[in-house]
Image: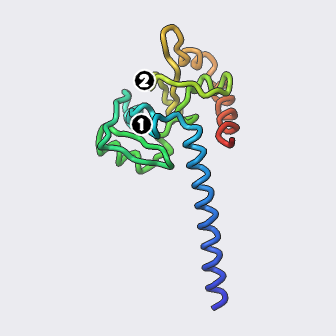
Amino acid sequence: MKRNAFVYLFILFIMGNNSAVFAQEEALRQKHFNSEKGIMLNGYDPVSYFSGKPIKGKGNFQYKYKNTIYQFASQANLDKFKTDPAHFEPLYGGWCAYAMGAKGEKVEVDPETYRIINGRLYLFYNSFFNNTLTDWNKDETNLKKKADSNWAIIFKQ
């Protein structure tokens, strides 16, 4: 009987700790992710990027994942996202990959300026005469390492 009580208490302890970790991650996402009123990618469908052309999502196809909302162009894309949300999320919280690598800064993006690298979505700032995707392409390996490091620091704060 004592063994069962111990197992039960252990499970409750683990669940409680996991809940605290999830709550902390959700708070960090809310603080650091590039979303407007909790909606990521300016309402663009994250799955559509992997089909070759970003498409605006619709309000009737949306899904809340770890305190951020994604919109989808179709039920099929929503269902696909649900199978592996982390795969479809933009890196660096949806901020400009170039700015994250070059300066460790959170800079707005043009949701139609992007690149898929090793199956992951990278977004870039693009306005008037400044397309940071062009600069990224010149030194991608170095900028990616720096962006990964910078984002890890920012996301912990």
Q: Position of residue 122 (x, y in %)?
A: 52, 29
Q: Position of residue 26 (x, y in %)?
A: 56, 49
Residue nearer the viewer, 14 or 144: 14
- Residue 44 placement: quadrant: top left
Residue at horizontal 54%, vertical 15%?
134
Task: State which tag comes first along the sequence, 1 or 2.
Answer: 1
Residue at horizontal 64%, vertical 77%?
9
Q: Which residue is disc 2 drawn over?
A: 112
Residue at horizontal 67%, vertical 39%?
152
What is the residue that sits farthest to the bottom in this orientation? 1
State the scheme by which the image is colored: rainbow
Mark 1 Cα-neighbour bin, 10 Å: few <14, some 14–19, many ≥20: many
Check disc 2 and report its element: helix, strand or loop: strand
What is the residue that sits farthest to the top in this orientation? 129
What is the residue that sits farthest to the front in this orientation? 37
49 left or right of 23 in image: left
Instruction: For the N terminus, give its image quadrant.
Output: bottom right
Residue 22 vertical placement versus 147 (above, below): below
Q: Which residue is disc 1 drawn over?
A: 46
Residue 39 vertical placement versus 8 (above, below): above
Mark 1 is on which residue type?
Pro
Check disc 1 and report its element: helix, strand or loop: loop
Residue 4 vertical placement versus 16 (above, below): below
18 left or right of 90 in image: right
Rounded to the nearest angstrom, the CA distance separating label 1 from label 2 is: 11 Å
Mark 2 is on which residue type?
Glu
Q: Position of residue 23 (x, y in %)?
A: 58, 54
Instruction: For the C terminus, give its image quadrant.
Output: top right
Residue at horizontal 53%, vertical 19%?
133
Query: Residue 37, which numbered label?
Result: none
Asked whether the residues under the numbered discs 1 and 2 touch, taking CB atoms below 8 Å apart as contact, a structural biologist would say no
Q: Position of residue 60 (x, y in %)?
A: 29, 43
